[in-house]
Image (cartoon, rainbow, N blue to C red):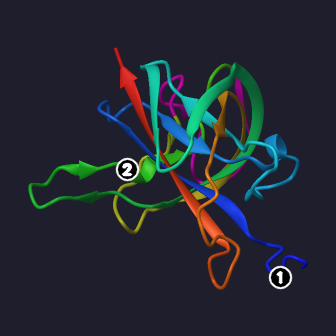
Amino acid sequence: MANQYPTASVSISFVVSTVDEDAVFIAEINAEDNGGRTSFPFGGASPKFRIYKSSEIKSVHSFTSDGSTSRVSSNLSETLTEFLSWAGGASADSDGNEDESYRNASVQKPVIGNYTISNIKGNIGSVSLVEQEKTTFQCSKISNGPLDPVVGFCMVTYGTRYDLYQLNNVSKPAGFGQDAFTDYQVLVYLVGVTG
């Protein structure tokens, strides 16, 4: 009998944790690593996922709701391009302290190595990375209040690095692929240990 649920698959979700609030620690499925897939049939290739991290993260511990994980490759490089935008002005809190968070915008991955800023539009001034291996860029324009906002965008091309991991040995649960049970979710909990 033909499988009446041909789209039955395994999906992976992540929860990441680190005690260092300043550390960058990100996990994601990239279709490029998995033959174009982001969900996976049972019996197929073991799904791979990327972990991006700043150097504060010295080791990674993983816990899964099903199966296990293993590292496949380390320190792989990637070049990304993202648009950053700014829109906001200076304000003060109830104690009169200036909030300059309007000057910050972040890329998605840690910036490791060189980066270039181009196509600056608006009144943001110059743009620079706040700290290597982090994600925050800051514009030089300083607002004189909410009626003197910083408004603009730029394009950032930057290098980053990641480790490639794999999810192994996921067990097919009883009843999977029948009725509404066509998506089996596996949760991967990752703890980045610093120092």
- In this view, the residue in front, 56 or 58, is 58
**Relative side of 158 to 139, left or right:** right
**Relative side of 13 to 162, left or right:** left
Q: Position of residue 85 (x, y in %)?
A: 60, 56
**Visible in this render: residue 148?**
yes
Inter-mark Cα distance, 2 to 1: 53 Å
Instruction: Quickly name the residue at label 1.
Output: 4
- Secondary element type, mark 1: loop
Q: Quadrant of the N terminus?
A: bottom right
Q: Residues within 10 Å of mark 2 (few under 14, many from 20)?
A: few
Closer mark to the observer between disc 2 and disc 1:
1
Residue 101, disc = 2
> In the displayed image of the protein, which residue is found farthest to the bottom?
179
Residue at 17%, 50% (x, y): give it.
97
**Relative side of 81 to 107, left or right:** right
Tally of numbered tags:
2
Name the quadrant containing residue 58.
top left
Q: Tell me which segment is drawn in magenta.
A: 114-134
Residue flagged by tag 1: what amino acid is it? Gln
- In this view, the residue in front, 168 or 106, is 168
**Visible in this render: residue 110?**
no
